[in-house]
Image (cartoon, helix red, strand yellow):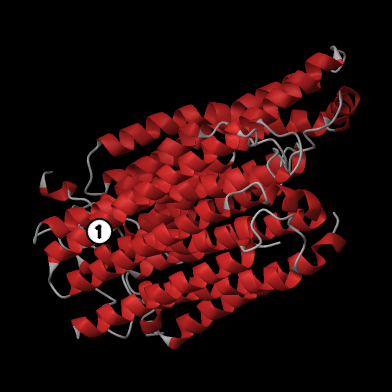
Amino acid sequence: MSAVPTAPPPRPAGRWARLGWHWRHDPKIELWIMWWAMFCFYQLFGVVFALMTRVMPPPKPWWGQARIVQWFSDNHDGLLWGFGICFLISGLVASCNALIGYSMRRMSVSRAFPYAYIAIYSLSTLPGMLLAAILLTVGAMRPDRDPAILSWIYDAAFMTFVGTMGVFLVGTAIWMLAILLDRNRVFPLWFGYLNICNLLTEVVVAPVWIFQEGPFAWNGVITFWVDTLVFVVYTAAFITLLRRLVLREDFGEGVLPDLAAPSAGRA
Amino acid sequence: MGASSLPLSPHRSPSRGEGCHGLPGQADIWYLVGFEALVFSSYFVVYLLYRSWNPDLFLQSQQQLNQNLGVLNTVILLISSWLVARGVQAAREGRHEAAGKQVWMAMGLGLLFVGSKLLEWSLKIQAGFEFSTNRFFSFYYFLTGIHVVHVLFGFVFLGVVLYQLGGPRRRSQPVIEAGAIFWHMVDFLWVMIFALLYLMR
Amino acid sequence: MSHETDRRLALVFALLTGVTLLSWWLGAGDDRQAFSPDAALSLAVILMAAIKLRMIVWEFMELRHAPLRVRRGADGFLWGIVGVMLLVYAFGSRMQV
């Protein structure tokens, strides 16, 4: 950590004083802000989509119009509050994309990789999250509309939410390539390979457009449950690895140093 | 930037696994194998569950598959795996040209596999069995389809292996072994898919 | 040395192909007759696939050179999942959701 140009004052003892020290003198403060923004975003995303709006796990794709209208009225408050939060925090996605783009800039690969990744993933927020949120909010706000229209909204919301994965597929492929080509060891190789699994889940969801029930519908065992598990493992892995990246960052060139042996006592 | 754009550069991982101690290839590729095995196991269990809920439909549909074509597919992949294993051995002994030849042949057989799958699908579709015909055929197209996607990934891995075998400065035995391990994984996944879709009753 | 490995790989390949043909003969021997449920045959076919899979992983992927702990883990995973698959085959019809 000798890359810091001017030596900062020594770290004070108290908890709050230390926080203040980090705020003023820690050269990584901006990276940490981005990391915490990303961390909070994924926590809130889970709370909003699983607990408040009841979108994950998704309701049944085979429901008739009456049942769909009832679903909208049952979840009216959860949908409005949940997606209200979602619209407020959706900007935090940018911090996630930025940090991942930053990780690729630290690699020994062309700048084209982070630019392409950021462009694609900022686009992917729309089909992956916002479109579903907008559609379901419209449904919750206009309960007196024709049930046929409401069930169209319901179908459209869940099909875009689960089924539109092409942008994620290409984005993941770009990140994977960058990690596998990189010589600065920003990410371990196994995470590069794990991208293959995440990428394949985006292929697996395609049958959602065809089936209304069974393992390949939008709430199916294979297309929803297995896919979501893989996605959760993948997301947890990259959040942890990005934290480690911030810890390891030396603001230099070349190979990124390993963590300063916290396991020295163990070894 | 020129030197840094080599794919899977040799300096990446210290060569961990040539002796009897560490894992063969890179340890990293084994994480992928383990995770893929987990994901595919879940598909297999779901398939067997749906199968046991409707055994008659599955049996009748299984009878529409061409077992002979399935065996041919298996043998094609087994030969290609064997060639790749021989190629790794040759590379280890420094006979890189021979290794390259083996890997080329393995890729050819992989292409043959993909071709025969396309043929099989088109025959099935002509006979009126499509993705949404019934639950068995959904699983049939899903499992064979996702497996073929893995074969396509395997071509990329073998391509990197061939690239590395091509010149002395690009070579890295762990990366070559990692590519081979991915190809063998594609092979063993097919072995299980073949048993579950074509053979079991 | 090289000759030895070559012979070993060839032997493994021959065994794999042999088991494949055996399971083919078991599973497709009654060509075009009506398929009927057959637990013994399914058990045999799945076990043969598992053995083939293990041979590929141990010989071609060279897991047999891995540390004992890893080999045990892989074996445990393989036979565990085969066990689950056979249980689902046998009792799946009672697990209606």
Specify whether A217 is left or right of A258.
right
Q: What residue type is labelled 1?
A: Val
Q: Which residue is drawn at 27% across and 48% down?
A: A106
Horizontal side of A96 relative to A74 (left or right) equals: left
Count of marks placed on residues: 1
Which residue occupies 36% across, 81% down? Answer: A264
Q: Which one is nearer the viewer's eye here, A249 or B58? A: B58
Specify the subunit that label 1 lies on.
B
The front one of C92 and A212 is C92
Foreground residue among B199 and B185: B199
- The vertical placement of C13 against A55, above or below, is below
Q: Which residue lies furthest to the left in this view?
A: B168
Instruction: Please give the residue where the numbered disc 1 appears in the rendered image.
Output: B103
At which x and y percent is residue A248?
Answer: 33, 60
Q: The C terminus of chain B lies in which quarter of the figure?
A: bottom right
Question: Where is residue B152 drawn, in percent x and y?
Answer: 39, 46
Name the one closer to the observer, A218 or B92. B92
**Above or below for B97 versus A157:** below
Q: What element carries label 1?
A: helix
Q: Is residue A37 above or below residue C31?
A: above
Horizontal and vertical percent for residue B140?
61, 47
- Camera sees residue B143: yes
Residue B82's quadrant in the figure? bottom left
Query: Is residue A24 in view?
Result: no
Q: Few, some or many C-alpha atoms within 10 Å of disc 1 (few <14, some 14-19, many ≥20)? A: many
* Left or right: A143, with A123 as reference point: right
